[in-house]
Amino acid sequence: MKGQDAIIQKTHLKDYCKLKYKITNVDLDFSLDSKLTIVKSKILIESIDPNQDIFLHGEALDLQSIHLDGHNLAEENYELSSQGLTLKNINKTKFELTTLCHISPEKNLALEGLYLSGDILCTQNEPEGFRRITYFIDRPDNMAIYNVKLTANKKLYPYLLANGNCTGFGDLPNGLHWASWADPFPKPSYLFAIVAGQLGHIKNSFKTKSGRNIALSIYCDPGQESRCHFAMESLIKAMKWDEQRFDLEYDLDQYMIVSVGSFNAGAMENKGLNIFNSALVLADQATATDSDYMAIESVIGHEYFHNWTGNRITCRDWFQLTLKEGLTVFRDQEFSADINSRAVQRIQDVKGLKETQFPEDASPMAHPIRPDSYVQINNFYTATVYEKGAEVIRMIHTLVGEEGFQRGMKKYFELFDGQAVTTEDFLHSMKIANPHFDSNQFQNWYSQKGTPSLEIHGHFDQDHNSFELIYKQQQKSLNKDSEINNKPLLIPLKMGFIAPNGEEFKPKLKDDAQPYWDQGVVALTKTEGKVKFYDVPVKPILSLNRSLSSPIYLNTDASLEQDLHLFKYDKDHFNRYEVGQKIIADWIGENLASKSKLDLSPKIITAFAEIINDQSIDDHMKALLLSVPTESVLHQRQKPIDFIKTKLSRDLFLNTIAQAFELQFLQIYKNLYPKTKGGFASEKVGPRAFKNLCLSFLARLGDSYKHLVFDHYQESDNMTDQFTAIYLINNYFESEALSVNNSFYQKWQNEDLVLQKWITTQTLGSDEKVFTKVNQLKALPEYDSSIPNYVRSLWGSFSRNYSMFHHSSGKGYQIFADQIIELDGINRSMAAALAKTYRIKTSVSEQNKKMINSELERILKLTHISSNLAEVVDQILNS
């Protein structure tokens, strides 16, 4: 299949049909080996119509034999294709089908189905990997009971793991051994998992609220056991939190996590046997940063929480992916907020949303959190489905409150436990538990794409002590084939009224259509409308969309003075951060538009000084309040984007702040340095972040602080500080960086996770030497294009070097496309993921747009392009 011939059939939500036949019981017998694995499958099939053909998915399988109810199946009763197996003229409503297939894990570089990660055999079956293991109804609404037997060479594969509970094990002749596993809970095929290999492990236990003891195990490459303890602590915290906050108890006798080096995603929630990217399990003081630790804690929680929101209740079809992922991201965010700082967690979650999901919503790749159609579902594991999906869940929580949300969750489990359901079913549960919740209008968030804009104006009537909030909402999408309905959304707007003296007050609201004002929330339900408040003693300054109560662009007529007032007085820490980001972005935007360099307003300098000197603000919050919007966020205000001027203008702001507060930053750095030595501890994260922010400002002042940065590198006793220093050295002291990079590389070249972090610091240059450097990094003996973490570290970081990726010569686009073409023959999912970087095409100059189109056309002409890649490229090319 060549070029556009590969593009491909769409699957549409409207075409969903219930299963007319199903698999109820599964017995799988694996003879495991990296070169040749033999899979014997015995499945019980029930059919409504004995005369209908039955189709079973299957890809890259070598069928050796097929039996029906113990007898050879005649050739005229089945048909094989590259997509699967069709059974014909069976004339039975219930029968047992047995197949024997050969598969080769070591040749499976797609990392879907059963594959080899290092020396470990493992699986990844979400969304459609199980069809690479055996013939099956590989869709999430077929839930079955699984029994599994694993046989392998005991020396090569001493550990044999699968879902559920272990029911037996033993030795066999010729150095073989076996283990059997049974999962008592029906599950879809995407949750099936096995792992086999030589594994190190640590063990612990957890006593549930009902008194059951759960055996906990984390498996890893031998020698890495000491780096698993934080993950174990995080798991126990998550289990305890889910009991306390959601009243949910774990349901099997054991819970296992396995760390592997080659994994397309972050982790996978297979029932009782989670398989994780090693970057999200392994951590110690020498190799992991504070952000690594926080990510591990979050993702360990996320996969555990899936046990109920994803496993016990799963998706009817893949269009409903946000049903489990959006809900579970919300749960893991709440977990992190409850055990750490809620304000800091919310700021970091929204930073991620604005840097990744907002650009996706403004691109040719925009889609609703529940898509209407897809070619390859792998392409819809997106920030929109996950992070925006979580924001949609959070809006429900904002509207109905914690008690109402918990009532809705209980109703959800009561009605749908053990079933494969839809987003409407979830909203129905919330509506039953909270009758005032307008689930019908709220449903629009699931079906409309793009980030809404909300325009807000206010009118204060001094004579009547009233205030009128005037709003207008608008939904936009850049897609030419947009099916967007532009129906008005139900937008929860959490807000506060700040007086000129900085005090907050709460006026009255005489509006029966606003049942949420008791919790400081108004529901905006019309395209245009007004909300009138009473008992307003003074003209207020509005604190709007507190804690990002809705994922929207907010446009107001607030002046710099009003923004600075909020920056100083707002009691909502998130909004204080948000308005600070707006103040900085506004100034950078003005500087970009100006024909001459602007001076920074003394009022902004004063505002920063007040933050620095305010002893009531903790260090982590100070680090966030003094941070500057990323280039990605600043780009969202421009069309076309000027990548070079944006970087220069942003640097000008940062350099001005560095010069204005040089002595304060130096003193803060010296004061915090001794308090932040050592490894990860929650009480050190904030001070370390603030200390390293101060160092980054000082590094901008050049040679005067070169020694401080290099001493920071040499004397650091943890990876957070060392990684900060090496980033600064590569960014500001490039001429002296060679020896540091060489020594770091020599020290850590055998530690993949550290080396992958280091690679992200090597693509920072602002001249064409970066192109040479990228090729040199790819040529490192440790770099392996078949390992997704290496691909992400090199090509992901290069694509964020905006001035070079978007270089006027087009060379950045070219070498990136070369990598995509190479990857498509190795790992189609990773190739498609990289190709999405070109979605920025609609926001660049006409010249850059032409160069991107040229590379996309070159990719699309590939002789054997995957449908994953073709779908993405075609969508961007035709935007």
Image: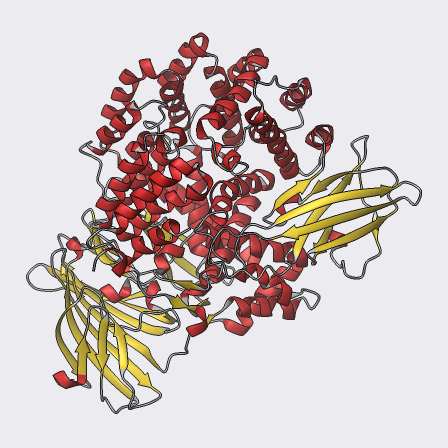
* Rendering coords of residue 879 (x, y %): 42, 50
- Please identify the residue farthest to the top as the structure is shown: 704
* Rendering coords of residue 340 (x, y %): 55, 40
In front of the other: 201 or 60: 60
Quadrant hosting residue 609: top right
Is residue 220 visible in the rendered image? The answer is no
Residue visible at 55% across and 21% down in the picture: 653
- Please identify the residue farthest to the right as the structure is shown: 463
* Rendering coords of residue 7 (x, y %): 30, 60
Residue visible at 41% across and 25% down in the picture: 724
Q: Quadrant of the N terminus?
A: bottom left
* Rendering coords of residue 530 (x, y %): 77, 52
Is residue 782 shown above or below 379? above
Is residue 376 shown above or below 707? below
Is residue 155 shown above or below 82? above
Q: Is residue 716 left or right of residue 1?
A: right
Quadrant hosting residue 808: top left
- Please identify the residue farthest to the left as the structure is shown: 174
Q: Is residue 1 left or right of residue 12?
A: left
Is residue 662 visible in the rendered image? The answer is yes
Q: Is residue 828 left or right of residue 348?
A: left
In front of the other: 612 or 804: 804
